Amino acid sequence: MIHVYTGDGKGKTTAALGLALRAAGHGMRVCVIMFLKGRYRYGEKYAAKKVLGLEIAAYGRGDLVRGEPTKKDIEEAEKAFQHATLSVKSRKYSLVILDELTHAVNLGLVKLDDVMRLIREKPADLELVITGRDCPPEILEAADYVTELVERKHPYARGIRARRGIEY
């Protein structure tokens, strides 16, 4: 089935990784591909090395994309989507998570048509998870599960910066 975690609230990646941990705990092979997060020091990248059957690959230059994407942003997104396509079609995994894919689509780094083709062509026995804000309606329509996380209150509004082990 196809799962989507979207919305402006914190927890989209965390929810997807919770599913990844559950699947890996049952002996399933899981691949997580992170778009736009290449150089960040996310704790989950380190933890995945300790979980049998869980692989995480992160792509991106590691800075927020503001304004026009750079050539490096485009190259990294292309590599990430190529990895995603190979992972989905490989039949090697039971679960593939495409983290921040909607953000890459909304920035024009990944074509929505390519995502829709990947969704249509995915093996029937593969669980596919897509995360990110402002999910395009076409992806929402194709999904079997849609969870929208809504921000009600967040420490960022009080000037508190991202904290290691909590936000990354």
Image: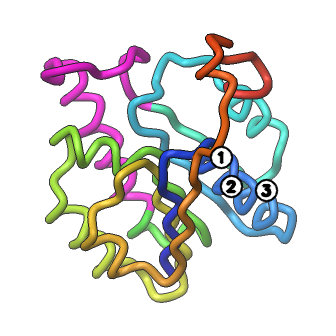
Discs 3/1, front: 1
Badge 2 density bin: few <14, some 14–19, many ≥20, Cα 10 Å? some
x and y, in percent, of residue 67 in the image: 17, 21
Q: Residue at image x 54%, y 78%?
A: 145
The part of the image, by quadrant, that contains residue 161 is: top right
Q: Are marks 1 and 2 in contact (CB under 8 Å)?
A: yes
Near-viewer residue (9 or 123): 9
Circle 3 sits in a helix, a strand or a loop, which is it?
helix
In magenta stretch: residue 71? yes
Residues at marks 1 and 2, CA–CA distance in whole angstroms: 6 Å
Vertical position of residue 36 compared to residue 132: above or below: above
Drawn side of residue 146 relative to residue 69, left or right: right
**Region rendered in magenta:** 59-87
Q: Are marks 3 and 2 in contact (CB under 8 Å)?
A: no
Which residue in the protein does label 1 denote?
11
Callout 1 amino acid: Gly
Residue 21: assigned label? 3
x and y, in percent, of residue 11 in the image: 65, 46
Dot 3 or dot 2: first in sequence order is: 2
Residue 15: assigned label? 2
Q: Residue at image x 35%, y 41%?
A: 80
Near-viewer residue (168 or 79): 168
Q: Are marks 3 and 1 in contact (CB under 8 Å)?
A: no
